Image: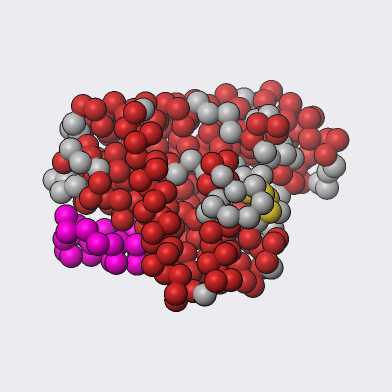
Amino acid sequence: MSLVHEMLPAVEQELREAVQRCGSRMGPDLVEMVTYHMGWTGPGAGPEATGKRIRPVLTLLACGGVCGDWRPALPVAASVEFIHNFSLMHDDIQDESPTRRGRETIWKRWGAAQAINAGDALFAAASLATLEAQREDLAPATRAEVLLVLSRACLELTYGQFLDLDAEDAAEASIDTYWQMVRAKTGALVAAACLAGGVAGGASAEQAEALAEFGLHLGFAFQVRDDVLGLWGDPAVTGKSATTDLQSRKKSLPIVFGLERCLEFRGLLAEPFTAAQVPRMLASLEACGARAFALAEGARMTERAYAAVGRAALLPEYDSALREMTASLLTRDR
């Protein structure tokens, strides 16, 4: 993973420079909110607060895999990460999440109304990161194509969040509607990150299609892993209670499977319950095969991702890095 270790400081620098360029248009108070959310300032700032920067690294690996140099895609990687973080800010408001990465969320610290403004600022910064970057190796036509890819992804991930929230109050759920939601909410941006990186590197039509397919199925597998950790992960490691997804009636894959296949679980979830009842609910899910099904689906999507990256015909060093990164993401415990 030496490539990734080399990329991460460069991504962080690109993100900081992009925020700095936007600073005069935002004012110091809004900049403070943005830099706090990005993990750079405030209580608890540091590597644990910034997150893994997965999506921008995928962008750089895709670019490098096509042309042998990942640096032209740095502004694109910054755009991708800003989009991801604007969506997280708004998701935290909608879900009323008090913490993220072990710190107070923006809305909890500054209020929901101002948190919406901070999210909007990051949304605008996403386009500017690519448009205003001083890089001669990123042609105007390439910038336009990248922003087209990312704008479409923004619309799709917003629809995915709509479907996710809508599903919480729905009495019925199905595996098909779950995949529709995940395709939009998670898969769309991961696919766009890979596709945009390929575009920045001058990918052929065949490479671009394969990179987008790789990102989509990686996004599917990534979300399934999140769903499993949300129910059976160690709260001390994940930083999230195992009761959260159940209490919000989140339609994660194991829960949807349980609603479809397990009468006992369906009855338990339909009634008000306390944290003390959660172990019984989890046992019911596991007994009916929900956990095993989710793990199998995650493995199936992972194999599809590997097959797609193989079709992209990337340079060997970058192909290996993408496969290694995929394996680490899908066996993680947090």
What kind of secondary structure does the magenta stretch mostly adopt?
helix
> Which percent across, then down, holds residue 309?
27, 33
Residue at point 67%, 25% (across, down) = 286
> Which percent across, then down, holds residue 124?
42, 69
Residue 59, quarter of picture:
top left
Say left or right for 97 vs 51: right
Q: How is the image coloured?
A: secondary structure
Q: Is residue 223 above or below residue 91?
A: above
Q: Is residue 127 above or below residue 181?
A: below
Residue 149, quarter of picture:
bottom left
Q: Is residue 176 above or below residue 316?
A: below
Magenta-tinted stretch: 128-156
User: The N terminus is located in which quarter?
Assistant: top left
Q: For this rendering, which residue is in front, 188 or 202? A: 202
Residue at point 26%, 50% (across, down) = 73
Residue at point 50%, 56% (across, down) = 85
Residue at point 38%, 61% (across, down) = 18
Residue 149 highlighted magenta (yes or no): yes
> Which percent across, then down, holds residue 215?
35, 41
- Is residue 212 visible in the rendered image? The answer is no
User: The C terminus is located in which quarter?
Assistant: top right
> Which percent across, then down, holds residue 228?
59, 33
Say left or right for 316 vs 334: left
